[in-house]
């Protein structure tokens, strides 16, 4: 089937109590790892592209690689989504360039400006058969060039969500309930150490999520910053020449609970980066005489596939949904 929008996948996910994984893509190996896992587990999937991905790999290369995945896996519903579109122009460029979904992230603007910018994108997108994700509230962490210090983030205000959605006409809404971008989501001061010395982050704000759901019944909610930063990969990176002390993510059981509620899209990027780079580091240290990229990219592509399979089964619950 051709690329799809997220409309039908979100409606089914909402009713079925699961979420669709939205994975960031930057190159062929990542696209192959993600879509091979989705095909094997019969899961719909969202491939998302950031501004940084577009400037690294180029719009044409990325859309053509995604087109190849669509041809290879015709049975898998795949949506191609712009992640964190900062303004109307980048959204328009992706809509005109074949994306089926865009995010307009005007969450750093005032409430009124956010509505105005989002509404303009929604009008253009809907005229072209494309759906729009918007955001209310601010996550901590780094996304493209914008860095929000831990402690400066703000949770979504549930009393604003109905007005925002009805005035903009957006199709899904990203909210801030304590998730955060990147591999260092919390400072040590924000966490508690458990008996094994592992840092445990503060729990997600399910009260904020539930209040938003009450005010937007049937409406798809999105969670950004939802990598869990698996400690086995952090260890592997540290063991094979890297240095990532106190990298910490969102516990997977909390994301699974959110997926059972109205959260229909869960964004995961850092976990894929960790899996790839840990595997490459290990391979090159263990094979000092190898220099063919195919040798070290093959196990790292397999690690992406394993990571996505794990997320589909243990976090998203989107397996066997095709
Ligand atoms: O939230 C942002 C995503 O992880 C994309 O990251 O801007 O480094 O491509 P990027
Ligand atoms: P992570 O950094 O937690 O993977 O979040 C990715 C994300 O939200 C992309 O928009
Ligand atoms: Zn994000």
Image: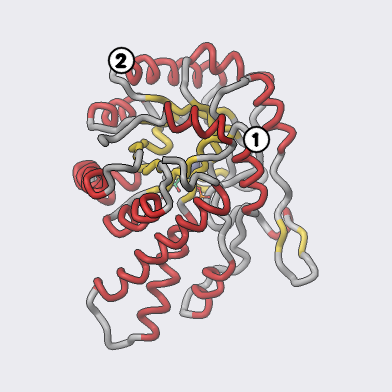
Q: State the CA–CA distance, disc 1 to disc 2.
A: 33 Å
Residue position marked by numbered label 1 in the rendering: 154
Residue plotted at (71% across, 63% down) = 199
Look at the numbered disc 2 and give the secondary structure of its residue: helix
Quarter of image, res 59: top left
**Residue 51 picture location, percent across and down:** 35, 41
Left or right of 114? Residue 102 is left
The N terminus - image quarter: top left
Which element type, helix, strand or loop, lies under badge 1?
loop
Q: Nearer the viewer, residue 294 or 107?
A: 294
Q: Where does the C terminus fall, quadrant-wise?
A: top left
The residue sitting at the right extreme is: 195
Q: Residue at position x 61%, y 59% from top?
A: 248
Instruction: Judge by depth and name the residue closer to the eye, 147 or 217.
Output: 217
Residue found at x 27% / y 43%? 74
Q: Nearer the viewer, residue 262 or 130?
A: 262
Picture coordinates of residue 58, whole percent (x, y): 23, 46
Quadrant of the rendered structure where residue 234 is? bottom right
* Residue beneath the point at 59% across and 13% down: 163
Disc 1 beta carbon < 8 A from ligand 3?
Answer: no
Residue 46 coordinates in the image, percent (x, y): 40, 41
Is disc 1 in contact with disc 2, using a CB cutoff of under 8 Å? no
**Mark 2 Cα within 10 Å, few/some/many (few <14, many 20+)?**
few
Instruction: Name above or below for residue 116 compared with residue 213.
Output: above
Residue 231 coordinates in the image, percent (x, y): 59, 67
Residue on which the image places disc 2 = 127
Seen in the image, is 93 located left or right of residue 51? left
Applied colour scheme: secondary structure
Which quadrant would residue 251 be assigned to in this image? bottom right
Q: Vertically, is 112 above or below 133?
A: above
Residue found farthest to the bottom: 289
Residue 243 located left or right of residue 91 = right
């Amino acid at each position: 089937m051709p690329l799809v929008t997220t409309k039908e996948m979100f409606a089914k996910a909402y009713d079925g109590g699961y979420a669709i994984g939205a994975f960031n893509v930057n190159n062929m190996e990542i696209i192959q790892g993600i879509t091979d896992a989705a095909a094997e587990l019969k899961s719909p999937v969202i491939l998302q592209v950031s501004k940084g991905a577009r400037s690294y790999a180029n719009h044409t290369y990325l859309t053509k690689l995604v087109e190849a995945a669509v041809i290879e896996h015709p049975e898998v519903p795949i949506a191609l989504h712009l992640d964190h579109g900062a303004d109307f122009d980048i959204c328009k460029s992706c809509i005109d360039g074949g994306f089926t979904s865009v995010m307009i992230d005007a969450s750093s603007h005032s409430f009124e400006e956010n509505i105005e910018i989002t509404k303009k994108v929604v009008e253009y997108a809907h005229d072209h058969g494309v759906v729009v994700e918007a955001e209310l509230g601010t996550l901590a962490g780094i996304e493209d060039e914008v860095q929000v210090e831990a402690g400066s983030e703000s949770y979504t205000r549930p009393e604003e969500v109905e007005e925002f959605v009805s005035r903009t006409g957006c199709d899904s809404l990203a909210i801030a309930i304590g998730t955060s971008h990147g591999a260092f989501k919390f400072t040590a001061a924000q966490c508690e150490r458990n008996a094994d010395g592992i840092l445990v982050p503060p729990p997600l704000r399910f009260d904020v999520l539930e209040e938003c759901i009450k005010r937007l019944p049937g409406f798809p909610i999105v969670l950004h910053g939802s990598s869990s930063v698996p400690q086995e990969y952090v260890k592997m990176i540290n063991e094979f020449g890297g240095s990532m002390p106190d990298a910490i993510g969102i516990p997977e059981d909390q994301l699974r609970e959110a997926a059972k509620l109205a959260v229909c899209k869960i964004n995961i990027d850092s976990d894929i980066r960790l899996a790839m780079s840990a595997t490459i580091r290990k391979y090159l240290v263990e094979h000092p005489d190898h220099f063919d990229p195919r040798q070290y990219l093959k196990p790292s592509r397999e690690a992406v596939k394993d990571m996505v399979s794990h997320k589909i089964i243990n976090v998203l619950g989107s397996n066997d949904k095709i």
